[in-house]
Image (cartoon, rainbow, N blue to C red):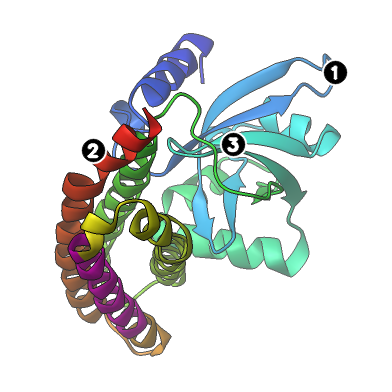
Amino acid sequence: MPHDFNQHVIDEFRANAGRVGGPFEGGRLILLTTTGARTGTRHTTPVGYLPDGERILVIASAGGAPHHPDWFHNLVAHPRATVEDGVFTYEAAAEVLTGEERDRVFARAVEADSGWADYQAKTRRTIPVVALTSVETGPPRFPGATPGQSVTLIHDAFRRELGTIRKELAESGSALGAQLRINCLTLCQGLHNHHTGEDLGMFPALRRHRPELAPVLDRLDEEHRSIAALLEELRRTLAEPSTAPGGIRAEVERLTDELEAHLTYEEEQLVPVLDAMAG
């Protein structure tokens, strides 16, 4: 992609917590910062990605060009990168997938979006797939954000991912693709991890320091349990090989309705408190 176009996307991404328009609108996008293979200079590139559990996958298609993109050569030479997903910024280890694993993952990508097959058909090279796995430990960092803003950023990321999955389900055929299953399962795990963190950290701290919030926190605890039951039901449905997109769509819509109400209530009740305590 031309440098000016890339820079426009980068600026828009950073200004809008990961939301962009144009060809990337409504898709999954990260900013990938790599170290130049020859120069050692840091370069940032907007790249689409696929969820894959605890890691994400990026495909070095370069639009079907005859040569691998620069960012791929950089990762081969320096297999560490900085990933920005609109909410979190983290350091990641890069692994170029090979053999059966690469072929299986690429086939999954093609099943989800035939454009990847079009790119492969345009070039003689085997388009590489790279797995990016966070190497950071400890709580997430939100540079420049207040505690309340941090909570809202996380919530908006879940809203955005749910919207993307709903769109994918609406556009899917009669069979549920493998990548779409993984997208749903990754969302389930992310929500579980987020709520567990609140249950073990933020909510107990608020109970200690702001006892008048007990009724609010009791309601949020109950909503966590209800959402956990919906997530478990979605996992069970996804585990059925014969499950059609319509069945998953119904479960996702139930989850979306309940989760949106929960996130909105939590923001209304806790964001002002969190920011006041930090002030």
- Is 229 situated left or right of 178 in this image? left
The residue indicated by pointer 3 is: 83
Residue drawn at x 73%, y 56% as measured from the top left: 97
Q: Nearer the viewer, mark 3 or mark 1?
A: 3
The residue that appears at 22% across and 53% down in the rendered structure is 266
Which element carries disc 3, helix, strand or loop? strand
Classify 95 as above or below 207: above
The residue nearer to you, when weighing 269 against 230, is 269
Magenta segment main secondary structure:
helix
Tell me the mark number nearer the camera, choosing from 2 and 3.
2
Question: In which image quadrant can residue 165 be found?
Answer: bottom left
User: Type of residue at label 2?
Assistant: Pro
- The residue indicated by pointer 1 is 38
Q: Position of residue 123 (x, y in %)?
A: 62, 40
Q: Name the element at disc 2.
A: helix
Crowding at mark 3 (Cα within 10 Å: few <14, some 14-19, many 20+): many
Q: Which residue sits at x=73%, y=45%?
A: 94
Residue 249 horizontal/vertical position (percent): 21, 72
What whole-number distance in Å separates the C-alpha atoms at marks 2 and 3?
A: 30 Å
Q: Earlier in the sequence, mark 3 or mark 1?
A: 1
Residue that carries the numbered disc 2 in the rendered image: 272
- Residue 152 at x, y percent in the picture: 30, 41
Instruction: Where is residue 142? Give x, y as percent.
Output: 49, 34
Spatial CA span between label 1 and label 2? 49 Å
Question: Which label's residue is closer to the chain start, 2 or 3?
Answer: 3
Say if 129 sits above or below 172 in the image: above
Q: As shown in the figure, which amino acid type bears the numbered disc 1?
A: Arg
Q: Is residue 119 visible?
A: yes
Q: Which residues are magenta?
A: 215-234
Q: Does 270 sit left or right of 60 as displayed?
A: left
